[in-house]
Image (cartoon, rainbow, N blue to C red):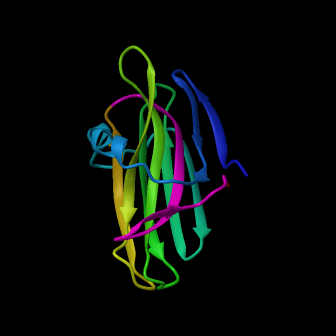
Amino acid sequence: MRFGRVSTMCGVFAATAVTVLGAAPQASAAGHWESPWRSYAEYRYTSSDWKGARSYIEISWNSSGKASVYGYARDTKGDGYGALAQVMYDYWNGSRWVHTQRTLARTSGGKGDEQWNYGKHATVKVRNVWLRTCMWNATGTICEGGAH
């Protein structure tokens, strides 16, 4: 189930709960977001529960491609995995849209463990923002297989 889709000047901005953690693009993506949360004209939120992991995101954006996100990851099972909330998105690098992702919040594990990210705003134009839910531990990451 697609959460929402809103057209903006720089493309389509969507918030959806989906899956999979990719490690390589994350390091470069961290510089695209900085504190604090900023409130823009449009606002949406979504959450996802999957195999003992819960994630939640709130997104605020405007028609100029400015956006803010905040949310949390929560371990609901206590099964040896922590919960991870990840944001996937496209950003404008000056000549084209590039797809990447970053971790929004991650727990260390244990039933009821919750980690919040109290907000970041994009320092570049972004579009197609998705929330992904994963479980992780020292042996690897397991992510949700389908979109919500």
**In magenta segment, residue 138:** yes
Q: Position of residue 105 (x, y in %)?
A: 38, 62
Up the image or down, 25 lies above or below 133; here it is above
In the image, taking residue 147 as reference, residue 99 lies left or right, namely: left
**In magenta segment, residue 102:** no
Q: Position of residue 108 (x, y in %)?
A: 33, 75
Q: Position of residue 140 (x, y in %)?
A: 41, 65
Q: Quadrant of residue 112?
A: bottom left
Q: Which residues are magenta?
A: 124-147
Depth order, front residue of 24/84: 24
Q: Quadrant of residue 85?
A: bottom left
Q: Position of residue 92 (x, y in %)?
A: 41, 24
Principal SS element in the magenta part?
strand
Q: Residue at x 39, y 56 (%)?
A: 104
In which quadrant will I find the C terminus? bottom right
Up the image or down, 88 lies above or below 18; here it is above
In the image, taking residue 93 as reference, residue 44 lies left or right, namely: right
Which residue is at the far top?
Answer: 95
